[in-house]
Image (cartoon, helix red, strand yellow):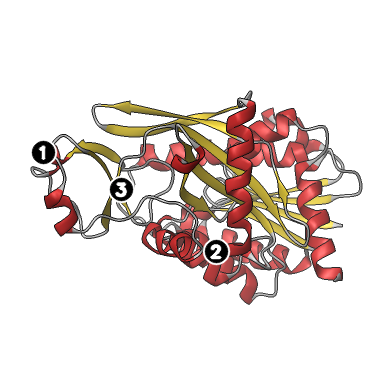
Amino acid sequence: MRILLLEFFSSGGIFIDSECERSPHERSTLVDEGWKMLQALLRDALRRDGLYIDVLLDESCDHTTEEALSHANVNCHPVANAEQFTQQLDDLAVTADYVIAIAPETDELLSQLAARLRKCGASVLLPSASQICWSSSKTQTCQMLTDYNIPTPGILSQKQLVSLNQDAFVVMKPDDGAGCVDTRVLTIAELSSVKPNSDMLIQPYQSGTDVSVSVIMGNNPVVMSPLYQQIKNVNQVLSFTGVEGDVAAEHAERATQLADRCIPLFSGARGWIGIDMVIGETPEDDMVIEINPRLTSSFCTLSEIADVSLVGMILDNATCHEST
């Protein structure tokens, strides 16, 4: 089986990135962080026998330090400009049995990448276009979860904000944000001095334990072991710093039950989704915060502790899905 591994920024997508306001430092950081994710994906894939792997890689990445790229079953394709990226992406995608692609939802990067791959006939392991669309919008995600009676923080209207106590905490974040980018925790009193952008939404702050649950979608969805999310609050600004295992049994059970309730929202999907949630004092306080329709950083941690290849599990579930 031949697969194409693609992480948008480190695979050369940075050359067609539409966000012209990114500084050289930010672009370099995105490529470096993406390269770490791509390395984890490649190493995991090599744990599965019988895979022939194509990898698109920005030539600025230090590929000489990654032994996996010298494996006989791996073919690395350097990318130096936008033309090379688009041409090689189109060529390799159609020859692969499956494409495993990673991109953030911001600025519609994930949806545009998925559309491009599908347009050229690639079998890309991502949710459907509509599933990517609604789960990339926190407003639409909130509505979808509500429609399915899955507990989630509501979006506060101006009338509701006015009625809250001045000491009440709320969360302000962009509708299409990824991770905790541009996410702040403020009191109502502090919020009154802030002028949020039009794409910002405000939700009640949910106290509790931050947990992430990953699911391999397909004919037989596999719920992975829950992980604790490490989220810091520095000067009212939230930042995501990673995940860790050893989740308490009660937290793991409740998180898994909540993740199970989200699976029907992605009926027919293949690939990986990540569900972020808060586990409260009681099960009635547990809430889904958002859903990522793609591979997330949790993959790296889960791959390290897994006895088998997670890429192999993704492919098995995709193959099973197609054969039914």
The answer to which quarter of the image holds residue 218 is bottom right
Q: Residue at x 58, y 32 (%)?
A: 251
Which residue, given by chain and number where applicable, does mark 2 sit on?
A: 113
Name the amino acid type tagged 3: Lys
The answer to which quarter of the image holds residue 138 is bottom left
The answer to which quarter of the image holds residue 114 is bottom right
Q: Earlier in the sequence, mark 2 or mark 3?
A: 2
Position of 153 with respect to 304 (left or right) is left
Element at label 3:
strand
The local crowd at label 2, few if under 14, some if 14 to 19, many if 20 or more residues have their Cα within 10 Å, is: some
Q: Residue at x 37, y 33 (%)?
A: 207
x then y, percent, for residue 22:
34, 47
Quadrant where the N terminus lies? bottom right
Element at label 2:
helix
Q: Closer to the camera: disc 1 or disc 3? A: 1
x then y, percent, for residue 253:
64, 36
Q: Kindly identify which numbered label has been placed on residue 189.
A: 1
Which residue, given by chain and number where applicable, does mark 3 sit on?
A: 173
Q: Kindly identify which numbered label has been placed on residue 246.
A: none
Distance Cα–Cα, label 1 vs label 3: 17 Å
Q: Nearer the viewer, residue 247 or 6?
A: 247
